[in-house]
Image (cartoon, rainbow, N blue to C red):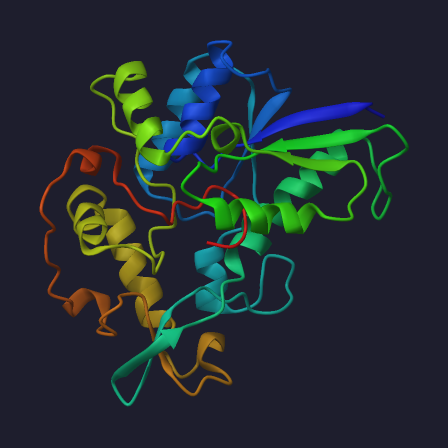
Amino acid sequence: MRKSLRVLNLGAGVQSTAIYLMIMDGDLPPVDFAVFADVGDEPAAVYAHVEFLKSLNGPEIHTVTRGCLGDNLINGGNADGQRHISIPTHLAIDGVPTSMGRRQCTSEYKILPIERFLREQAGLEKGQRLTKGQTITQVFGLSWDEPRRVERVKANFHGRAGWQPEFPLFDDMMTREDCVRYLEKRLPEYTVARSACVFCPYKRDSEWISLRDTDPIGWQRAIEIDRAIRQETSVCTKGMNATQYLHKSCVPLEFVELKAEPPDRQAKFQWSQMDCEGMCGN
């Protein structure tokens, strides 16, 4: 049984990438390893980015998965053969947008598989608690401009003896823009893609356009999921009084008139507050 673990939750987005490189450069305390939770439907650029990070010979990167989230949405039942998992789709009643659906995907497909893996690495049996003096520290890529997310993650750790979160970016008052500037210097001429499923409903039009134009397989997968969540035979529609869509306009994705946004200097890093960096509460 290992006495302690210090681990980076690697979402492979802007902020966790910055932390990974800072650890490599000795600017942050070392970790035993990093963990990337694969939901099965990340953009091709994200998978390529994870392989790029592995090639740098920094902290070892482990990939964990609970199965393919997209298949769950199409076929029903999670990877354990149990209930359907909800994603935050845009909801409409009689064609009028109303609200967003529940978000269970981050917890079920990122947080839980990472925690299971960490428990195994710590030598714990199922249901066994950390022993006295044993600690598991998870390092999160949340920055100074995300105080609410930091507080939500802290709340998730409250009362769990031996488990502790760390937020080096937040503690150093580094914003996402600071991370962008750091990456521009550390990885010149390199693009860090947004970390989120190809069918993530939080995408802006510029991100949908980028997916459509640069990742045709991912774009077709998003259309497939968008169709599936409205099929009468789909488990996604059971108990729903509203119709679900991936795009905020509540129009089928393949028919949405996507509008490009004015370019800005953060477009290089596909800026979004909704990077799925492996914690709950976006």
Q: Measuring 29% from the left and 17% from the top, which residue is drawn there?
A: 187
Which image quadrant for residue 9?
A: top right
Name the residue rendered at 25%, 85% in the picture: 95
Which residue reaches farthest front? 173
Tell which of 206 and 73 is nearer to you: 206
Quadrant housing residue 44: top left
**Residue 82 percent across, percent down from the top left:** 65, 66
Any part of residue 66 in sight? no
Q: What is the residue that sits farthest to the right in this orientation?
A: 132
Side (left or right) of 48 relative to 5: left
Q: Is residue 61 visible?
A: yes
User: Please, is residue 269 above or below residue 89 in the view?
Assistant: above
Label total for image:
0
Against 113, residue 29 (above or below) is above
Q: Position of residue 277 (x, y in %)?
A: 47, 41
226 is higher (above) or lower (below) than 171: below
Quadrant of the snapshot with the N terminus = top right
User: At x 51% / y 9%, what residue is drawn?
Assistant: 26
Q: Judge left or right: residue 279 versus residue 233.
A: right
Question: What residue is rendered at 28% in x and 24% in y?
Answer: 181
Residue 70 drawn at (x, y percent)? 43, 58
Image location (x, y in percent) of residue 209: 16, 51
Q: Is residue 182 above or below residue 37?
A: above
Residue 153 lies left or right of residue 163; in this view the side is left
